[in-house]
């Protein structure tokens, strides 16, 4: 019986400690001097937490502009990640402009979590598209505007046809 009393507290403790470990170190990111290649690489793990933050916070969150700015500053000089922006992608970001940044964030997350996949541009593309699709599914509670084109992409993903569709778009 005593163990049953401990389980809820253990669950709360483990949940809260994992949330704390995922928090963004805003001060370090804002004050990072990104001049040399090593400067960018040093904060890769912090950027990964920032990417997770971007994927989990409302588009109108008070820190969104700051987060976007930090991410873009890192991405434009990072030797760790190179993202390709294809023409087809732009039509999926018209109603939700933040999806372009989420696409880049998803691709970056893929590479940061799988450094050996840095040259896997198709895997990066898929990670980017899936990242903004996952965000879209959160709906208007996250600040997303309805978009029929994005809904069609979701249907392709659910039918297992997204990879083939993206491959055709980049040929």
Image: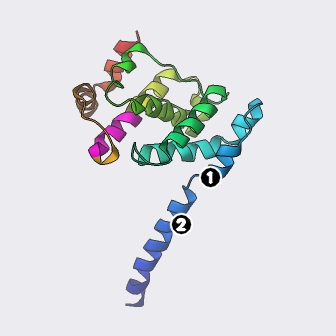
Find the magenta span and give its range: 131-140
Tell me what residue is drawn at x 43 percent, y 72 percent. Answer: 11
Q: Residues within 10 Å of mark 1 (few under 14, many from 20)?
A: few
The image quadrant where one finds the N terminus is bottom left
Q: Quick check: 91 above or below 159?
A: above
Badge 2 is on which residue?
17
Pinpoint residue 73: horizontal percent, then vertical percent: 62, 32
Pinpoint residue 22: horizontal percent, then vertical percent: 54, 55
Is 7 placed left or right of 70 in the picture?
Answer: left
| Residue that lies at the very extreme toward the top in this rendered image | 171
Tell me what residue is drawn at x 64 percent, y 30 percent. Answer: 80
Pinpoint residue 105: horizontal percent, then vertical percent: 50, 34
Q: How crowded is mark 2: few (under 14 residues within 10 Å), some or many (20 or more)?
A: few
Q: Nearer the viewer, mark 1 or mark 2?
A: 1
Quick check: is 137 in the magenta stretch? yes
Q: Do the residues labelled 1 and 2 touch (CB within 8 Å)?
A: no
Gap between marks 1 and 2, in whole Å?
Answer: 15 Å
- Mark 2: which secondary structure? helix
Residue 97 occupies quadrant: top left
Badge 1 is on which residue?
25
Tell me what residue is drawn at x 45 percent, y 25 percent. Answer: 125
- Mark 1: which secondary structure? loop
Quick check: is 154 in the magenta stretch? no
Tell me what residue is drawn at x 38 percent, y 84 percent. Answer: 4
Q: Quick check: 150 above or below 112?
A: above
Circle on res. 145: none
The image quadrant where one finds the C terminus is top left
- Which numbered disc, 1 or 2, marks the residue that appears first in the sequence? 2
Pinpoint residue 49: horizontal percent, then vertical percent: 56, 47
Magenta stretch: helix, strand or loop mostly: helix
| Residue that lies at the very extreme toward the front in this rendered image | 62
């Amino acid at each position: 019986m005593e163990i049953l009393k401990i389980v809820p507290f253990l669950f709360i403790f483990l949940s809260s400690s994992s949330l704390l470990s995922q928090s963004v170190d805003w001060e370090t990111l804002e004050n990072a001097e990104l001049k040399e290649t090593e400067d960018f690489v040093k904060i890769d793990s912090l950027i990964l937490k920032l990417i997770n933050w971007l994927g989990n916070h409302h588009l109108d969150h008070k820190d969104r502009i700051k987060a976007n700015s930090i991410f873009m500053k890192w991405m434009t000089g990072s030797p760790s990640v190179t993202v390709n922006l294809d023409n087809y992608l732009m039509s999926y970001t018209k109603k939700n402009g933040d999806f372009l940044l989420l696409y880049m964030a998803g691709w970056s997350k893929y590479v940061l979590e799988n450094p050996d996949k840095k040259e896997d541009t198709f895997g990066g593309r898929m990670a980017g598209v899936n990242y903004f699709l996952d965000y879209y599914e959160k709906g208007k509670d996250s600040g997303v505007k309805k978009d029929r084109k994005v809904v069609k992409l979701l249907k392709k993903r659910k039918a297992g046809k997204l990879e083939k569709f993206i491959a055709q778009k980049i040929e």
